[in-house]
């Protein structure tokens, strides 16, 4: 299990391009500017449906890779350090460029990005990280029957029922919460333990993925046309287009099945790019960038013919990824020069020693 799966690393990269894509379509203004029910609008909506599985994909990857791996607190320390670096750096830059937008609250939030939810996924993942050993132990020790029961119960309660009602039935934040990431992490860990994905061919995986997207689009479109009472009020509030939607979950599992089986022949660029994925997220989703520079930046794409618009969105997503990854490479060089990972490993050893000392002093008999 120690050999690195470059197919999964490629999956990380594609998932982040999906994340950029969903932001281009949404925050970037493409979907909002398109004429309702036009071909361009429906195409943008279909792209949004394809891209929206990105969060579930990242949580699945974490479980798939994390199952059986040694728990390393140094990883979350490095994770926090990178988040802190961009949170503060971008705030300082904006302070000098547009001083009026950086107030005391922005400074405090940037200094404590996890506690003040500067990035929602970072905060949710930070919480999840400390429960990963427990989830791994549960999956490792559970029987196949109990694992199926647990996953089925979680999906029915947190995905199927909310997909029917269109609301946040059991307060998973429609996927913006540690609880939902934990569910997807557990599914990813179970997929690693049991060879269920190996029974799905790459072709079948892609067919299943696009079928899920088509079903989501068809259901949403059907509700719009039929004007179904209690469901219609959710139509323009992302009904069936959310991280917890059952078709989104299944689509992300199909993608995991696809990428877990492929073996890229030239994996050098994947090895180079994979460590930069988090930086792409931290850069383009920083509130000062996301709310000022990114907002409606791509609104002009909505005036293009549908096929051209679709291609332009994809190319823009790749371009944003490339620009942010290039910038993050400079951060990586700086961190390597400062021996950031070694420092985090040093802190892990010290904290682990203190924890063991504290626990032994309280539990050992006198």
Image: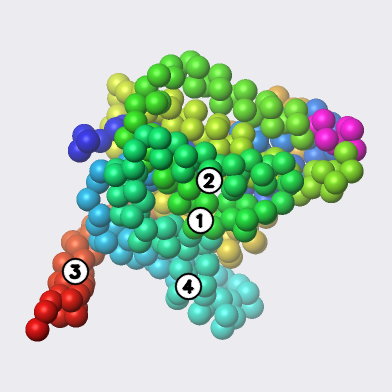
Select label 3 or label 1 by which is in front. Answer: 1
User: Does the segment drawn in magenta span residue 1?
Assistant: no
The residue to which callout 1 is attached is 179
Alpha carbons under labels 4 and 2: distance apart: 27 Å
Residue at image coords 51%, 56%? 179
Q: Which residues are magenta?
A: 221-227
**Can you say whether 53 is above or below 73 in the image?**
above
Find out whether the residues at labels 2 and 3 contact each other: C-beta distance under 8 Å: no
- Marks 3 and 1: CB-CB under 8 Å? no
Q: CA distance from mark 2 to mark 3?
A: 33 Å
| Along the viewing direction, whichever of 334 and 144 lies nearer the viewer | 144
Which quadrant: the N terminus?
A: top left
SS of the residue under disc 1: helix
Circle 2: element type: helix
Residue, x 65% and y 36% (percent of image)? 49
Please determine whether, in this image, residue 21 is positioned above or below residue 343.
above
User: Which one is nearer the viewer's eye here, 20 or 201?
Assistant: 201
Q: Main secondary structure of the magenta part?
A: helix
In this view, the mark in front (2 or 3) = 2
Q: Which residue is mark 3?
A: 352
For disc 4, the neighbor class at 10 Å (few under 14, some 14 to 19, many from 20) is few
| Label whose residue precedes the other's in the sequence (4 or 2) | 4
- Answer with mark 4 or mark 3, whichever residue precedes in sequence: 4
Residue 53 appearing in the image: no
Q: Position of residue 53 (x, y in %)?
A: 56, 39
The answer for how far apart the CA atoms under marks 3 and 1 are is: 26 Å
Q: Are marks 1 and 4 in contact (CB under 8 Å)?
A: no
In this rendered view, identify the residue nearer to me: 7 or 205: 205
Q: Earlier in the sequence, mark 1 or mark 4?
A: 4
Q: Which residue is mark 2?
A: 154
């Amino acid at each position: 299990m120690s050999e690195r799966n470059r197919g999964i690393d490629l999956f990380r990269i594609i998932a982040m391009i999906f994340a950029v894509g969903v932001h281009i379509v949404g925050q970037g203004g493409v979907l909002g500017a398109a004429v309702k029910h036009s071909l361009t609008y429906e195409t943008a909506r279909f792209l949004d449906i394809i891209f929206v599985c990105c969060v579930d994909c990242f949580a699945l990857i974490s479980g798939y890779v994390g199952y059986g791996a040694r728990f390393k607190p140094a990883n979350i320390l490095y994770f926090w350090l990178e988040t802190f670096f961009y949170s503060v750096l971008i705030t300082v830059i904006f302070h000098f460029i547009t001083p009026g937008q950086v107030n005391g609250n922005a400074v405090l939030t940037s200094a404590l990005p996890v506690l003040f939810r500067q990035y929602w996924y970072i905060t949710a993942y930070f919480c999840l990280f400390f429960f990963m050993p427990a989830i791994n132990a549960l999956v490792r020790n559970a029987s196949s029957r109990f694992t199926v029961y647990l996953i089925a119960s979680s999906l029915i309660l947190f995905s199927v029922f909310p997909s029917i009602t269109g609301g946040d039935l059991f307060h998973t934040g429609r996927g913006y919460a540690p609880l939902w990431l934990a569910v997807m992490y557990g599914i990813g860990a179970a997929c690693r333990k049991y060879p269920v994905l190996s029974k799905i061919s790459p072709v079948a995986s892609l067919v299943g993925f696009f079928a899920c997207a088509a079903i989501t689009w068809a259901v949403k479109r059907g509700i719009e046309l039929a004007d179904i009472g209690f469901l219609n009020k959710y139509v323009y509030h992302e009904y069936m287009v959310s991280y917890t939607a059952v078709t989104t979950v299944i689509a992300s599992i199909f993608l995991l099945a696809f990428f877990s089986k492929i073996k890229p022949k030239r994996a050098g660029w994947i090895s180079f790019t994979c460590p930069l994925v988090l930086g792409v997220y931290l850069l383009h989703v920083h509130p000062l960038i996301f709310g000022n520079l990114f907002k409606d930046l791509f609104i002009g794409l909505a005036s293009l013919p549908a096929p051209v618009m679709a291609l332009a969105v994809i190319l823009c997503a790749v371009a944003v990824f490339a620009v942010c990854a290039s910038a993050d490479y400079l951060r990586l060089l700086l961190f390597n020069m400062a021996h950031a990972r070694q420092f985090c490993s040093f802190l892990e050893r010290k904290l682990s020693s203190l924890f063991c000392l504290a626990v032994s002093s309280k539990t050992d008999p006198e």
